[in-house]
Amino acid sequence: MIEVSRLTKTFGPRLALDDVSFTIQKGEIVGFLGPNGAGKTTTMRILTGYIPATAGVVRVAGYDVFDEPYEVRERVGYLPETPPLYPELSVGAYLQFCAELRRVPKAKRATVIGDTMERVGLRGWESRLLGSLSKGYRQRVGLAQALLHDPSVLILDEPTSGLDPAQLAGIRELILSLAGSHTVILSTHILSEVDALCPRAIIIDRGRVVAQGTLAELREQAPGGAWTYVEVRGIDGPRLGSLPGIAQVEPLPAVDGWDAWCVRATTDPRELLATRAAAGEFQLRALERRAPTLEDAFIHIVGREGGQA
C-alpha cells in the first residue's frame, strides 16, 4: 500500500533524507519513530505530495506520488502535527469546507460530517469556533478532516498530541478500529502509543532508516534480553546462582528487608524458583519475568547509530 524506495531529500546543502526505503502493507498500523530532526515529518510530507523528493520512488495505494499526485491525494488522509485550521470558522463550517475540497458528494456531506464528528468525539461541537478550542480538540478536528473522505491510507503526525487521558483512550480506540480497512502510518514521540497501537515500527535517525520490524524484533535488539526479577529471603546470591539453568545473578536494591535479584537463565526460571520455594528451600515474595521495553530498544538503536535519544 505504501512503497518507499531509495528516497532522498535535500534542503540546500542539508541532507534531510538519505536513501530511505520501507514498505507498509494494506491494513497495517505502523509506528514511525525517531528523534527530533530525524526526518519523520519530511518523509510524511513527501508521502502526501506536500513537498517533492530530491530522488527516489514513492508509491501510495499503487500510484506514484510524483507522477500521479491527484490520485494519491484522493486516497490519503493527512493529519500534520499542527492541523491547518482557520480560527474564525466554526467546526461545522470548517468540515463542510474540507468535505467540498475532498469532493464528498453534496447529497452525502451532512451525513458524512455528522458520522465523522461522532467518531472523533466532536458531536455537538458544530458551532464552536476553531480559535476557541483547546489543543486536544483541535487535534480531533484535524483527525476529522483526515477521515472525511474515507481514505485508504492515513498519515498521522503526532495524532494524540495535547489529548487528556480520556480523549487519548477514545482516539486510540478509533485508530485501532481502522486496522484492516485502512493503512495507517503513525508518527509519535510517545512510545507507549506505539506499544498500544502498532504491531510493527520503523525507526529513522539522521535521515536514514536504522531499524524496522515487529515490536518484539525491535526489543530483541536491546542489550541484556529477558530476565527474571525475584524477591527472596533465606538464600544468598551464590546459592541462587547454583540452581540448575541459572546463568547469572545480579543484586538489586533490597525492598522492605527482602533481597532483590536479577536472574538470567538459559530458560525461563520461574517454575524452578517457585518449586524450590514451595519445597521450603527459601522464602519467595515476588517473581516476575521482565523484558527490554520499546524505549530500551529505541535508545539502544538510535544511540548505536550515532543519534540522540
Image: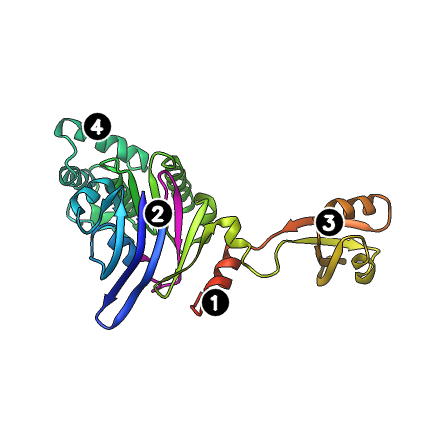
User: Bounds of the magenta span?
Assistant: 23-41
The amino acid type of the residue labelled 3 equals Pro
- Quickly name the residue at label 2: 185
The amino acid type of the residue labelled 2 equals Ile
Q: Residue 269's mark?
A: 3
The answer to whether residue 264 shows anywhere in this view is: yes
- The quadrant the C terminus occupies is bottom left
| The residue positioned farthest toward the bottom in the image shown | 13
| Residue 26 counted in the magenta span | yes
Residue in the picture at 43% in, 51% down: 201
Q: CA distance from mark 2 to mark 3?
A: 38 Å
Q: Earlier in the sequence, mark 1 or mark 3?
A: 3
Q: CA distance from mark 4 to mark 2?
A: 27 Å
Q: Earlier in the sequence, mark 2 or mark 3?
A: 2
The secondary element bearing badge 1 is classed as helix
Q: Nearer the viewer, residue 63 or 105?
A: 63
- Quickly name the residue at label 1: 303
Instruction: Specify the quadrant of the image occupied by residue 14.
Output: bottom left
Q: Nearer the viewer, residue 300 or 212?
A: 212
